[in-house]
Image: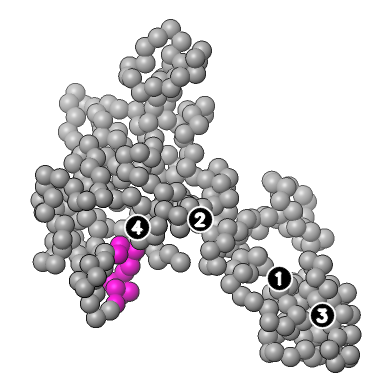
């Protein structure tokens, strides 16, 4: 559904003050200090798409625009303000709302907020989401006095840090009696303490690393069908599947969602048009039986489970073969 952002590196317009959040994304800084992305522009409908590549920007009325090109609508045109629907941060940079894939740290700009939510991803409003990796990201170019270093929010000598999700997290003041949280530094008060971003008691640190199953630091993934798939524990002796983590049984292994042997990955992208037709040739015959026997004997029933579970009990075994033989011999 989504196209990973892939942009060409053209160093004539690329400056270090623009954030490099992901390797495949290149931001170009204009003379106003604003950072801009390349985009695909339809000069008939005026539609702007950021999640395409130059190769996929096709159409008789579409052109690929690299910031600084003559066709660019933004470059050097917003020195005093930001375009409509953009937000200006403390560094003077303009940023759009976007959908963020926390598992691979990739932003998407061309999908709606509802599509983002339905896919289990995070909708980011610049300046409102704690730890937005772009917001105030170029402020670290500020020259600090007295040997201080700017943090990821651009504050000289500040406490903010980038967490494992790639987001900039703030420290805060915590009153351990009233349980109130504030950002009024320095933290003053008899029962007020400073909580650093990476403190084990800080609930915000890595909090946005939730996967599509809303598990914090989980490894569930969106497959090519748009479904959220979970990892699971697989016993390679009994062939039992469970979700009792960690997978610590003597013959258990954890199967990741996108593992080639995971039968659930992309399973809803395909349909079994004929139960028992495990080789997909449209007929039920002895070849399907041979394939099922071979898979069962090798304990590899993943590839045939969609059409091979003839009696619909969730597994492929000898009972399915018996049932399929009866169907074939009965001419049904």
Which mark, residue 109?
Answer: 4
* Residue designated by label 1: 302
Residue in the picture at 21% in, 45% down: 93
Other residues around mark 2 within 10 Å, as few (<14) / some (14–19) / many (≥20): some
Q: Nearer the viewer, mark 4 or mark 2?
A: 2
Task: Kindly report the secondary structure that dominates the magenta region of the rendered protein.
Answer: loop
Instruction: Read off the residue under disc 3.
Output: 293
Element marked by disc 4: loop
Residue numbers of the magenta segment:
49-58
Q: Quadrant of residue 227?
A: bottom right
**Residue visible at 53% across and 67% down in the picture:** 224
Q: Counting residues from the N terminus, which is met first, the one under dot 2 or under dot 1?
A: 2
**What separation in Å lies between label 4 and label 2 (alpha carbons)?**
15 Å
Element under disc 2: helix
Q: Is residue 5 magenta?
A: no
Seen from the viewer's position, the closer of residues 210 and 151 is: 210
Quadrant (top left, top right, bottom left, bottom right) of the C terminus: bottom right
Q: Residues within 10 Å of mark 1 (few under 14, many from 20)?
A: some
- Earlier sequence position, callout 3 versus callout 1: 3
Give the mark nearest the N terminus, 1 or 4: 4
Q: Residue at x 47, y 34 (%)?
A: 204
Q: Is residue 313 left or right of residue 1?
A: right
For the residues labelled 3 and 1, the Cα–Cα distance comes to 13 Å
Q: Dot 2 corresponds to which residue?
A: 118
Q: Return the x and y of residue 173 as percentages of the image width and height.
A: 40, 20
Can the viewer see residue 296? no
């Amino acid at each position: 559904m989504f196209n990973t952002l892939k942009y060409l590196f053209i160093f004539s317009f690329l400056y270090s003050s623009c954030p490099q959040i992901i390797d495949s994304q290149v931001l170009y800084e204009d003379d106003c200090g604003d950072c801009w992305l390349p985009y695909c522009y339809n000069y008939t409908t005026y539609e702007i798409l950021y999640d395409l590549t130059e190769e996929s920007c096709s159409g008789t009325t579409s052109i690929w625009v690299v910031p600084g090109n003559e066709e660019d609508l933004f470059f050097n045109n917003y020195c005093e303000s930001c375009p409509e629907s953009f937000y200006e941060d403390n560094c003077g940079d303009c940023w759009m709302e976007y959908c963020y894939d926390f598992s691979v740290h990739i932003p998407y700009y061309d999908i709606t907020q509802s599509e983002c939510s339905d896919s289990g991803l995070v909708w980011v409003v610049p300046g409102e989401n704690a730890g937005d990796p772009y917001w105030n990201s170029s402020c670290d170019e500020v020259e600090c006095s007295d040997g201080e270093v700017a943090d990821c929010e651009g504050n000289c000598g500040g406490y903010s840090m980038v967490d494992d999700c790639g987001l900039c997290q703030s420290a805060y003041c915590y009153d351990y009696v009233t349980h109130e949280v504030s950002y009024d530094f320095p933290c003053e008060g008899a029962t007020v303490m400073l909580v650093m971003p990476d403190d084990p008691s800080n609930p915000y640190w890595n909090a946005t690393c939730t996967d599509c199953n809303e598990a914090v630091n989980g490894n569930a993934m969106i497959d090519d069908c748009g479904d959220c798939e979970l990892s699971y524990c697989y016993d390679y002796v009994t062939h039992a599947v469970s979700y009792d983590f960690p997978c610590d049984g003597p013959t258990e292994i954890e199967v990741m969602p996108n593992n080639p042997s995971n039968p659930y990955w992309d399973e809803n992208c395909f349909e079994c048009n004929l139960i028992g037709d495990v080789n997909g040739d449209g007929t039920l015959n002895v070849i399907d039986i041979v394939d099922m026997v071979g898979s069962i004997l090798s304990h590899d029933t993943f590839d045939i489970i969609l059409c091979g579970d003839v009696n619909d009990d969730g597994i492929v075994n000898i009972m399915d073969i018996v049932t399929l033989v009866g169907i074939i011999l009965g001419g049904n």
